[in-house]
Image: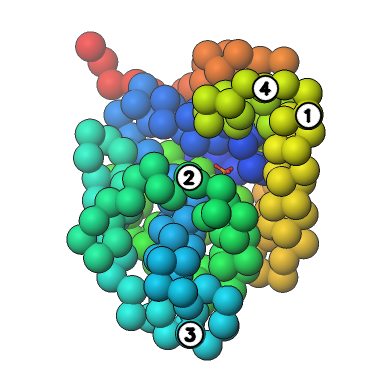
Amino acid sequence: MRKHVIAIDGPAASGKSTTARQVAQRLGFVHVNSGLFYRAITWASLRDGWFDDIDRLRQGVARLDIAPIVQAGVLDVQVRGVRPQSALQGRDVSARVAAVSATDFVRKRVLLLLRSSAEKADVVCDGRDIGSVVFPDAQLKVFLVADVRERARRRLLDYHVEPALAAIEEEAERLRARDDADRTRALAPLVKAADAVEIDTTPLASDAVIRRILELAAERGMRAPEG
Ligand code: CDP
């Protein structure tokens, strides 16, 4: 039987990953955070010092041992046998990931990893190009948006930083820069697919967003397992 795919796209810190994880949990699907793969490649390139030279980046990516592993319904990424986990969310990785993920060889490598993950399980996959490029036939496509200052405030809370006004402005600037890079790149830019449902999460609590997506999923025949 054809596997189910729910695609959740949107700009940086729009709540895609937290939402996708909870929706997956409720439906018994696997959560696939595509950003983790781009972050893992960026992390490895920073560690090995091959990030700022396109030829060395290409060679490094071709040789990189990177694999998805599923644990408790969530897909994590393993690089050379280790799981970098929280190291992938650091500011150094965040500052460079948009440049690394704009290259054709990085996108091709991640696309194959994502598609193979969805051959084995029903998935909720979040990212920038999931509904437009990776899974254009997804049964449900959602595009999450939120005001940039609200996104900055939420991201600071994730980092356990006091969301004071100046800090929010600074973080908002970082998010804007990454969104601009993601929106304007030639390959698989951040874009809302024509058949995606847009949800503005600025005024919404996380629970309300999850409920809305579960309703949309149910309308398309995807329901939580009984009991
Ligand atoms: O969680 P956050 O929104 O900050 O970012 P992420 O989902 O971890 O993605 C990090 C970066 O990876 C993005 O800014 C994009 O440059 C890239 N990315 C991409 O190009 N395509 C995707 N499907 C997912 C992420």
Q: Position of residue 32 (x, y in %)?
A: 39, 45
Q: Nearer the viewer, mark 2 or mark 1?
A: 1
Pointer 2: what residue? 89
The chosen color scheme is rainbow
Residue found 29% across the figure and 61% down from its top: 79
Pointer 4: what residue? 163
Residue 166: which disc? 1
Q: Is residue 173 visible?
A: yes
Above or below, 175 against 162 in this view is below
Mark 3 residue CB less than 8 A from any atom of ligand 1 = no
Left or right: 114 in relation to 215:
left
Q: CA distance from mark 4 to mark 1?
A: 8 Å
Secondary structure state at the residue bearing disc 3: helix
Residue found 42% across the figure and 25% down from its top: 22
Residue 56: which disc? 3
Q: Nearer the viewer, residue 114 or 98?
A: 98
